[in-house]
Image (tube, coloured by chain):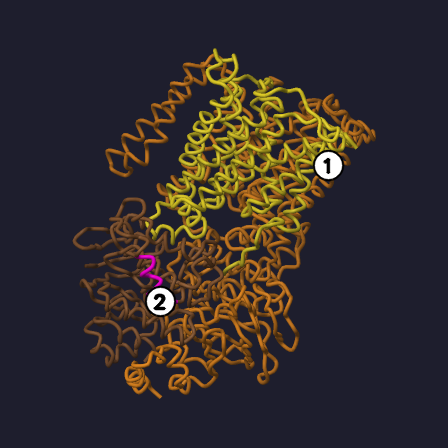
Chain colours: A yellow, B brown, C orange
Amino acid sequence: MEILLQLLFSGIALGMIYAVIAFGYQLTFATSGTLNFGQGEALMLGALVGLSLVSTIHGGPYLNFWLMIPVVMVFGALQGAVVEWIGVRPAIKAKSEFGWIMSTIALAIIFKNVAENIWGKDDLTFPSPVSATPFHVFGANVQLMQVLVVIGAIAMMLAVELFNRKSIYGKAVVATSNDPDAAGLMGINTGMVITFSYALSSATAAFAGVLVAPLTLTGATMGTSLGLKAFAVAIIGGLTSGMGAVVGGLILGISETLTGFYVSTGYKEVPGLVLLLLVLAIKPAGLFGKAAIKKV
Amino acid sequence: MLSISNLHAAYGKVEVLHGISLEVPKGKVVTLIGSNGAGKTTTMRAISGMIKPVSGTVMLGGKDITGLDSHRISRAGLAHSPEGRRVFSTMSVNDNLMLGAFPRLTGSRPKGDVNADLEKAMELFPRLKERRTQLAGTLSGGEQQMLAMARAVMLNPDVILLDEPSMGLAPILVDEVFRIIRNLKERGVTMLLVEQFAAAALNVADHGYVLENGRIAVSGPAEKLRDDPAVKAAYLGG
Amino acid sequence: MNAKKLGLYVAGIALLALFPVVVRNPYYIHLAETILIYAILLFGLDIVVGYTGEVSLGHAGLFGIGSYTAGIFFFKLGVPYVMLVVGASVVVTAMFGAILALPALRVTGPYLAMVTLAFGTIIQILINEMTFLTEGPLGIKVPKPSLFGHKLNELEYFYFVAILMLFALVAVNRILRSHLGRAFQALRDSPVACDCMGVSVYRYKVYAFVISAALAGLAGSLYTYSEEYISPNTYNFELTILFLLAVIMGGRKTRSGPLLGALIVVTLPSLLSDISLFRGIATAAAILGVVITAILLVKRQKTWRDVIVPVTSVIAMAAFSYNLENIVDWRLTIFGFMTLFVVYYLQDGIVGYLRNVSGKLWPRRAEVNDIDGVSASEAWAPRSQAAQTSGKLLEASNILMQFGGLKALNAVDLHVARGAIHGLIGPNGSGKSTMMNVLTGIYQPTAGSVAFDARSIVGQTPSQIALAGIARTFQNVQLFGEMTATENVLVGLHHTFHSNLFDVVFNTRRYRDEERAAHQRAAGILQFVGLSDMAHEEARNLPYGKQRLLEIGRALGLDPKLLLLDEPAAGLTAPDIKVLIEIIRKIRDHGITIILIEHHMDVVMTISDLVTVLDFGQKIAEEKPALVQSDPKVIEAYLGSSVTDSAHAVQSVADAAPA
């Protein structure tokens, strides 16, 4: 029983990370109908830049963990803007879906390779900002970092949601996702909104990166599978539903820790991917998404 | 106020407008009528920057706005209530109206008193008042049309383009739409109105242009056009 | 096959045969062998990427399945017959291709790309984890195979691969030139139109994936014997990207493109391992880039804005190359930049680019089909003359179509008499196009029944309805833009083909007869709609008026009993409209019933037998043309007389309308 509970707790922490990355997919999809295939790489870069700032590997530590977070998020925002500028904007202009899919993939490869060359190919340990000694809840071990992950993830999503609902700039973002042409008529620079959504999306991913890093190993290869599984979460929850991302994340996170324990750690990636295939084959709009009426 | 000369526009390789010229004087309502496919909506889109004209010029109050992005044209003071209403369906009526004033709230147009204008808009469009917090997507077609028009008014623009405000509406709502247009006219709002209901449009307008296959076929004072055979030709195919 | 092509084939075969004799170095022979193997896979990948237009990130996984099927058959089951092993790999991989295609039934674009990526990832995990079959990370050793009791040596195996590559080349070429290939292309250019031509998008997407996977399986099994050792790490994401890069860089929708692409991606790593060579190439590229840019800028063909990105990148690349110690570590970055470059500046790939350039220098004469005996002898005449000339062909009753709260169609009846031209008019948003979409199965009506030829068609798919005899055109032209006018009509004639894959690959009598007959009929149809002299022009390059006519021609290919024309005169000039009216009349005279949606009243009024008027989702009138024009309800719908004080104007307009 304790074991099950413990798996549940770590599943929830993992799931919230997926939810945050999936949330990032939703942000860009809403404003431009495009997805960054390098979302996982944005997370990885965030984690590694964070690592350089707080550890000794590049002559640091320069900052403590908490001060590092805003710096990493600014870095993530810049990185996202670059992706949008190089990879997405020309493709949107040319109305080429193939174009943005291929160019965000290409950029992802480049980022990963650059990271391999800067931080090496081996996984590194990220120093935990809080005590790693677990405490007990109903007999199960819980790490403080896991709690922080859950709180941080929720806070991040709430902050974005609040921004969208309350500020006029956030409303401009929502308007652009509703109808970009009409948003343009309102005087909203939709191109800028799309760039902003990429910046925000990558900043979110970078934030997720520094949250998850103390719990796992950090390295150039950490992003790819996280990005893919978060996409599964985004699909399961529906690309239009923030709540869906959280539920999808929890489903995946928990099923993954259970598989890892009861089947084999080698297979722990499989349930998410199978779930992705199933959802897309059966209900492509996701569990929480709305099906669009197709127009001819 | 708004002056268009020799405007050409195309979708891809297909040229749809072959040189349109028209004038919308300050404080007047001008209507552009013609059968479907004549190029009315294309003209509107080319004016407001939703598509880039191939050639020709669009001047707004003496300023050349030809080929600018639509957000710049909006900030220059031209509001466009587009065909099909295009309200922001997942947002509340209030939020939709606030977005109409986006350039004012973000400093690219004189701010004035946005909240007071919001209340004024509610007076002008009473149907919206009781639905302020409702999501725009849940409004009826007529209410959405009111919202689209109110949203354009919120810009405090120099000119409003109204594209087919009566499209797909039940007759009683069409009446209301035209009553509001008349109301706006009395307040001195400059408007360019595209309509498929020619008779009704010519009734409210000061001046009319009949568009045929991407060219202005006839133009003149609205009263004159009402009896013109060209109007009939544009509608019932002669 | 014309002489030029034959010459190319002979030269190619000679090159393959002589290569190992001239170049005796086993390293290079092995490299050439790998190129051939990759080329087989890339032919298949091109079917998915180039023709159906989907991004597959799962081909490394399929390649792995092929490799491991071969490995397992040999290592675990001890099957010694190479042809059996290769055959098994093809079949098993094709089956996985079908599984991979299942989600493709529902999704496209980025979703499908992610699905294929997930598939590839799962395959790699399974290969790693299912040690009882695959030996996991240890890998499997497989020696060169024996053929007819003779163990092949390196050289003989090279020829074995070369022969299979040629077989794959010919087979893929034949498939893509056949009705199957046309279906693949059509579903990319316009899925809706494809379904409405009776070519099921779902089915042909699955076919495309299965054929593509089969080729990946073939390549995979050959790779196993070629390397003599396989391990899970080979089949990773990097390989998938390499494959994609090869296809788009070489040139999509060609056979030479994948060959060239394979050559590039196989030799590139060894090229990159030599830093001084790379520096040379990068410098040359930078100089070339700067020179070309300078020329373009001087000639004012491009502005600074257009060229700044590519030029800075090539210069940066050159500068970068001198700062590197070890180029191998930066291999993926270089692949990434190459992909970006190809995606934005070389969209048609190298082969496509060369074709464009040579096409500008030496304009090619229109490509003539090598099907013999095709002559536009007789103009089109429908095969199935309508037997009865009376009664209703279509009875749509009480149709309700609801989108959320909006009733786009509210209890509409539409009964169409056999052999009639039935006009359907109404203001914008009145539900005309919705009606079209209900009749062709694109929308399922919320309530109501549709009987066509006395059989209910509600609930049938668009392609089933099309095959039952309802053809249509589209309000916004939905041609297969990258296909020629003839090919567009041939897609309409798809239903006349009964040949299967075997017939196509082995070019059997049946297939040749069907293809010839179809070409003849296509030529006849094009003559009928007056497009004979543009038969080999790509549809997207036709003038707008001709595109509309071509759509009608394509619909006629279906041999329909009922033809739905959705605003055929929209955007047409006056002379074009005259031609159109003539054509519509002739079609009716051939016994085909027509429903005509049109805003040009003169068109509707001159040729319709009966006109139905919709307004606000409801039928407000159904009368003979002359009566409709004077019906006060119709005038109100069009002119909005309900605005109280406009009665005078409306009355004057109504009075002026001809009786």
Quarter holding the C terminus of chain C?
bottom left
Chain label for disc 1: C
Left or right for C226, reference C637: right
Residues shaded magenta: B117-126
**In the rendered view, would you say A200 is above or below C335?**
below
**In the rendered view, would you say A17 is above or below A185?**
above
Closer to viewer: mark 1 or mark 2: 2
Q: Write down the quadrant of residue C39 in the picture.
A: top right
Left or right for C370, reference B78: right
Circle 2 SS class:
loop
Chain label for disc 2: B
Residue C526 seen: no
Label total for image: 2
**Which residue is disc 2 drawn over?**
B164
In front here: B38 or C426?
Answer: C426
**Which residue is disc 1 drawn over?**
C89
x and y percent of residue C644 in the render?
33, 81
In front here: C53 or A253?
Answer: A253
x and y percent of residue C357 in the render?
38, 39
Q: Amino acid at mark 2?
A: Glu
In the rendered image, residue C107 lying in the magenta stretch gets the answer no
Left or right for C104, reference C272: right
Q: Amino acid at mark 1?
A: Ser
